[in-house]
Image (cartoon, rainbow, N blue to C red):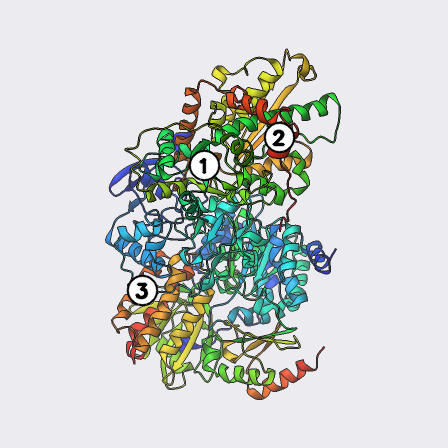
């Protein structure tokens, strides 16, 4: 059994092998690996008696279930209207400068990925972003620097 | 009483219609010959309701209603052709056109494309909207059988539903969302790297040119033009009952003689019959079955795999290789008629006509997309050359006849050439689901008992028709001495067509609950007459017409049992020598299978 | 009129009677009485579509099924909306009590909260609340169990049938209706899918009674409503206001003095220009003079520094990505609207092309498969109609 198969098996044991378990299992894989690999999709397909294409079709439907590798910390900056009005561009510029990557890219050390996302539901406190599951609001270039420094120091 | 309670009435365009509860608006309209245009709808598939071109006005509803998805309700007042409806439909078609690669002039499906027909019918202006066709779409030509061109896809998802519902293969899926939504394989891999079984059902369900068979007729034209080459074609039974549809005839028209004549006119050096090797298949496969029964029943050898399953359908063969690789022993080792033909064309036939095998180009006219892949399997070289150089679909043959400038309606009938041109009614019925089983029973029963199979006029009705899984049982009594071990045995058989039904059969085998001795499986619904290489449209109505023609041809034959084919007797005498399953036939007519990955 | 803007705190406030006491009281009544109260109260779904909640419960209660489900729709994704997150953060007990009452009424033993992936950080907090809720159910002998089901970033899953597909492991694509979820919902069983705030409001009806509830709001729009206020405002946040306020009053209260337009109902709602503030009322369409706009509660305010072209382009970016993509008008329509206004702005298309695009919005509204597809073009038509010059120059 490969490492991926063991991981998927644990998730299947936890959530069950019915079709309804598909999304929780995909999320579980994403949490552990920061993307859903082809290997993981095949393993899920086998466990849930689905075709791998089927699993791929479901995974790609969701913005948060990337099928290409992402960094350990996935930064998703809200680009929807109110955050956009509140200078989201400045936030993105700052992040691009600090991380030395463009939106859509991952740092060489695989620590950070920088992505756009749609409305996060923090319009009254924009600009806002997610780093993995944690929300950061009322962002300014200064707070961005502090936040990223903090994450850089995390293992 | 129950049925009366379930009848409701609606008004469509002012006409009262009574229908059963649960009938969709689209179906109700068809009942009174009101045609509503559709794209995502297909009789074979579940309702999708996503193209929206079938919208109609329902009195009292604010929005238009998708007639394919909406059930009629009592006293509904429906209008299918109002300015509002027409304008919305035209807009929707214009949108689809704006997302489409509109180079219709060079499209293989031109004049047989549902989007093109609708755009023309509604006089849609290509410039209504800006083009939002994604730039840089590459055509996937990785598969021997199927070409996938996303630039012509209308996202109706018929192919995805076909692959899932009819075939239980799920090689293709809907991936991504919004503007990026597309029909994709796993990880968007090339078609030849995924579990696609090449059945081509997606092709005959595609409304446009997004999915087509890979065409090989240009290579064949080249070979025909090359004087050094002897080009021989064998035509499958289901091609002759469908080729007419490509050339202006109604489904089920009997045009065998015209087809043969046209192929000769095209320049094939010899036009032969796949039926010949269908008969040969029956003799080989029947012997194989009796051998397995003997080992199991008489010798009590439990290592013998029963039920035995037919192996003529290359879509089915690849399916079992992917999905049930641990059960390949159940497959008959017989090659399909196409591949038997190929192996003999470059050996027996070459010898007979005195042509060097390397100068023979062996072509097969098939109802099938998977035959292309089958011809290119590495193991299919038992003649020492590639046994079949190209498998063409019925559609490709239709194109070739048109390209040759032949007036099909005017041409006079011609007969198949010899040798390998003789056939029996048992071979013709290979084209319909249940046909291989019926042919096998006609021969096997006679071998075992010395008598005709006990069905009226040899017609084994229980295995005929479009039911997904069919069963029959024949009690074996008064067996000949050699088969006394079968005395009193009830031979149980099943027939499945469409891979969804194959899965039911295979799951029984997997669970050890299969009650059968012998099973016929065809990948395509309806059998070969509904194959992925057949004229479009193919639906149950068309399937039934083609099947009808097949059985009419069988009934007209003097010889209706494979073992009675004189050329079959001849080949065992002159060439194969040591009988069915003998040394030579083992080498040329039998094959082995490959375990494949399910994912 | 001014007093309509008073904060009511019906939804977010703390009351002497706890949510679980309200539930206890409800559980002593006959389900059919609770349903008729709900219908009488006129409570309409707070997700934006505005279907009568009482009817939904009634249908699900009447439907045959060995198993039934209550699903709380917390897939709040409409741009400019953040009230459900606030409710789940501040008063989750009210939501759970609403689900409990619904379960009792329709006969469900299992409930789900479909929580959008963006709110995943709320899971530990909600799980604690759910555990406490289960204890209360046990005490009240209500056989009902709630689980959280997380989304993963797909706006369209807020549409109830898309949400059910997503839960079942299919792509989050809306289904054909009929059948409706009340008959054929999660796993084919009768299911009530209610927005977070709707469940709270259903609980409010049980707490204060039909009469008190109907005193709030106007005509066809009863009760209070949470508004998510954002954009060019000195006071962004959540406000618990009464239905029926005019946009003029609203802007006086929340605008920055330079308000040019208000987007009511999020990106799929309507953009109202200054000249129509007075004649526009917030509520479900009824017999009012002027326009009455339904809303999931999103109020985005734009001042005169904003380019409405940029605003519209941002919306269209959102929709062409977040459309599920299955139906023609929504998938291609959104792309056409976007490339269309860009072409007009660049001068590649004549301004008359905007008329063609407006005609397209009509087609989208009447032919799209789901409620979202039917409403995505609202912002386009209202912005292009009212700010045509900004689209061209």
Q: Residues within 10 Å of mark 2 (few under 14, many from 20)?
A: many
Q: Please tell me in which quadrant of the rendered image residue A62 appears.
A: bottom right
Quarter the N terminus of chain C occupies:
bottom left
Q: Is mark 3 on a helix, strand or loop?
A: loop
x and y, in percent, of residue C334 in the image: 39, 65
Q: Residue at x 34, y 58 (%)?
A: B102
Q: What residue is at 65 percent from the left and 51 percent from the top?
A: A46
Quadrant showing the C terminus of chain C = bottom left
Q: Earlier in the sequence, mark 1 or mark 3?
A: 3
Disc 3 target residue: B129
Report the number of numbered marks: 3
Residue B366 in view of the camera: no
Circle 3 chain: B
In this rendering, the label closer to the viewer, 3 or 2? 2
Q: Looking at the picture, how far across and down is residue A65, in whole percent? A: 58, 64
* Between marks 1 and 3 in the image, the one whose residue lies nearer the viewer: 1
Q: Residue furthest top?
A: B478
Circle number at residue B585 = 2
What mark, if any, has residue B233 been given in the picture? 1
Q: How far apart are marks 1 and 2 (CA)?
A: 22 Å
- Tell which of B508 and C131 is nearer to you: B508
Nearest the viewer among B68 and B463 is B463
Pick whichever, B54 or B337, lies toward us.
B337
Would you place residue B341 above or below residue C125 in this image? Answer: above
Chain letter of disc 1 in the image: B
Q: Where is residue A97 in the image (x, y as percent from the top left)?
A: 57, 85
């Amino acid at each position: 059994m490969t490492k991926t198969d063991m991981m998927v098996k644990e998730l299947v044991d936890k959530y069950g092998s019915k079709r309804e378990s598909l999304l929780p299992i995909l999320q579980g894989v994403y949490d552990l690996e920061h993307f859903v690999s082809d290997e993981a999709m095949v393993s899920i397909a086998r466990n849930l008696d689905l075709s791998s294409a089927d699993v791929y079709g479901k995974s790609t439907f969701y913005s948060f279930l990337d099928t290409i590798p992402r960094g350990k910390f996935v930064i998703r900056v809200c680009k929807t209207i109110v955050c956009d009005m509140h200078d989201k561009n400045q936030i993105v510029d700052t992040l691009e400068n600090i991380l030395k990557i463009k939106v859509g890219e991952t740092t060489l050390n695989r620590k950070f990925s920088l992505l756009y996302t749609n409305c996060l539901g923090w319009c009254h406190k924009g600009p806002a972003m997610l780093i993995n599951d944690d929300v950061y609001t009322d962002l300014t270039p200064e707070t961005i620097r502090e936040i990223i420094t903090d994450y850089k120091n995390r293992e | 009483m129950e049925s009366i309670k379930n009848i409701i009435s609606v008004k469509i365009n002012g006409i009262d219609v009574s229908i059963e509860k649960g009938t969709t608006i689209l179906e109700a309209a068809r009942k009174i010959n009101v045609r509503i245009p559709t794209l995502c709808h297909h009789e074979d598939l579940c309702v999708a309701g996503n193209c929206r071109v079938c919208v109609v006005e329902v009195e009292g509803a604010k929005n238009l209603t998708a007639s394919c998805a909406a059930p009629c309700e009592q006293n509904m007042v429906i209008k299918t052709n109002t300015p509002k409806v027409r304008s919305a439909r035209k807009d929707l078609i214009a949108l689809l056109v704006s997302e489409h690669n509109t180079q219709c002039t060079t499209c293989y499906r031109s004049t047989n494309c549902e989007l093109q027909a609708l755009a023309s019918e509604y006089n849609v202006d290509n410039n209504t909207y800006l083009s939002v066709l994604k730039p840089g779409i590459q055509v996937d030509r990785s598969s021997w059988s199927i070409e996938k061109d996303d630039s012509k896809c209308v996202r109706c998802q018929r192919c995805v539903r076909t692959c899932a519902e009819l075939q239980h293969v799920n090689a293709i899926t809907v991936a991504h969302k919004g503007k990026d939504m597309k029909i994709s394989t796993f990880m968007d891999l090339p078609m030849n790297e995924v579990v696609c079984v090449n059945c081509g059902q997606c092709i005959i369900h595609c409304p446009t040119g997004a999915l087509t068979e890979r065409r090989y007729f240009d290579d064949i034209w080249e070979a025909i033009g090359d004087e050094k080459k002897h080009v021989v074609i064998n035509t499958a039974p289901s091609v002759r009952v469908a080729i007419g549809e490509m050339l202006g005839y109604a489904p089920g028209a009997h045009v065998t003689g015209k087809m043969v004549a046209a192929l000769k006119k095209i320049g094939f050096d010899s036009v032969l019959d796949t039926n010949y090797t269908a008969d040969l298949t029956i003799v080989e496969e029947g012997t194989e079955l009796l051998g397995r029964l003997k080992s199991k029943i008489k010798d009590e050898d439990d290592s013998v795999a029963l039920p035995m399953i037919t192996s003529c359908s290359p879509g089915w063969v690849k399916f079992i290789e992917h999905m049930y690789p641990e059960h390949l022993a159940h497959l008959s080792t017989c090659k399909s008629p196409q591949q038997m033909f190929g192996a003999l064309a470059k050996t027996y036939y070459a010898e007979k006509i005195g042509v060097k095998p390397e100068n023979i180009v062996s072509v097969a006219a098939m109802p099938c997309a998977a035959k292309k892949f089958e011809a290119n399997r590495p193991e299919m070289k038992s003649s020492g050359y590639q046994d079949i150089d190209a498998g063409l679909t019925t559609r490709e043959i239709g194109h070739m006849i048109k390209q040759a400038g032949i007036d099909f309606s005017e041409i006079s009938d011609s007969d198949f050439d010899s040798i390998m041109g003789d056939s029996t009614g048992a071979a013709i019925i290979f084209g319909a689901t249940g046909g291989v089983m019926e042919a096998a029973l006609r021969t096997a029963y006679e071998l075992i008992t010395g008598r005709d199979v006990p069905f009226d006029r040899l017609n084994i009705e229980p295995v005929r028709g479009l039911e997904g899984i069919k069963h029959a049982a024949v009690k074996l009594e008064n067996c000949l001495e050699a088969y006394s071990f079968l005395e009193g045995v009830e031979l149980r058989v099943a027939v499945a067509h469409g891979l969804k039904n194959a899965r039911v059969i295979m799951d029984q085998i997997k669970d050890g609950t299969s009650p059968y001795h012998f099973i016929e499986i065809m990948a395509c619904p309806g059998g070969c007459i509904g194959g992925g290489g057949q004229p479009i449209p193919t639906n149950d109505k068309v399937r039934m017409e083609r099947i009808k023609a097949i059985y009419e041809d069988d009934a007209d034959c003097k010889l209706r049992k494979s073992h009675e084919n004189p050329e079959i007797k001849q080949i065992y005498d002159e060439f194969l020598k040591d009988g069915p399953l003998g040394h030579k036939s083992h080498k040329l007519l039998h094959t082995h299978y490959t375990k494949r990955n399910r994912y | 009129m001014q007093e309509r803007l008073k904060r009511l705190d019906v939804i977010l406030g703390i009351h002497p009677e706890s949510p679980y006491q309200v539930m206890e009281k409800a559980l002593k009544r006959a389900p059919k009485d609770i349903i008729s109260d709900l219908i009488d109260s006129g409570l309409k779904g707070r997700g934006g579509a505005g279907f009568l909640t009482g009817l939904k419960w009634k249908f699900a209660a009447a439907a045959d099924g060995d198993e039934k489900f209550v699903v709380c729709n917390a897939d709040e994704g409409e741009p400019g909306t953040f009230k459900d997150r606030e409710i789940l953060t501040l008063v989750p007990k009210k939501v759970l009590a609403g689900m409990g009452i619904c379960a009792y009424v329709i006969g469900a033993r299992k409930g789900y909260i479909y929580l959008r992936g963006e709110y995943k950080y709320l899971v530990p907090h909600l799980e604690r609340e759910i555990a406490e809720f289960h204890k209360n159910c046990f005490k009240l002998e209500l056989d009902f169990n709630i689980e959280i089901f997380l989304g993963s970033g797909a706006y369209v899953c807020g549409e109830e049938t898309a949400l059910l597909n997503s839960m079942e492991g299919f792509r989050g694509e809306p289904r054909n209706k009929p059948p409706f979820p009340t008959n054929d919902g999660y796993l084919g069983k009768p299911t009530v899918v209610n927005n977070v705030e709707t469940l709270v409001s259903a609980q409010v009806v049980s707490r204060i009674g039909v009469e008190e509830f109907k005193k709030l709001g106007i005509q066809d729009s009863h009760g209070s409503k949470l508004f998510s206020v954002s954009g060019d405002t000195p006071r962004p946040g959540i406000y618990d206001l009464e239905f029926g306020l005019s946009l003029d009053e609203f802007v006086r209260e929340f605008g920055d003095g330079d308000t040019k337009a208000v987007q009511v109902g999020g990106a799929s709602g309507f953009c109202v220009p200054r000249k129509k503030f007075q004649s526009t009322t917030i509520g479900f369409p009824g017999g009012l003079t002027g326009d009455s706009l339904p809303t999931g509660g999103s109020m985005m305010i734009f001042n005169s520094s904003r380019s409405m072209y940029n605003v519209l382009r941002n919306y269209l970016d959102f929709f062409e990505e977040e459309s599920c993509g299955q139906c023609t008008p929504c998938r291609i329509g959104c792309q056409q609207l976007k490339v269309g206004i860009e072409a007009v702005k660049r001068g590649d298309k004549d301004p008359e092309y905007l008329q063609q695009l407006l005609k397209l919005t009509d087609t989208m509204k009447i032919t799209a498969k789901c409620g979202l597809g039917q409403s995505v073009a609202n912002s386009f038509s209202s912005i292009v109609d009212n700010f045509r010059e900004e689209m061209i120059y």
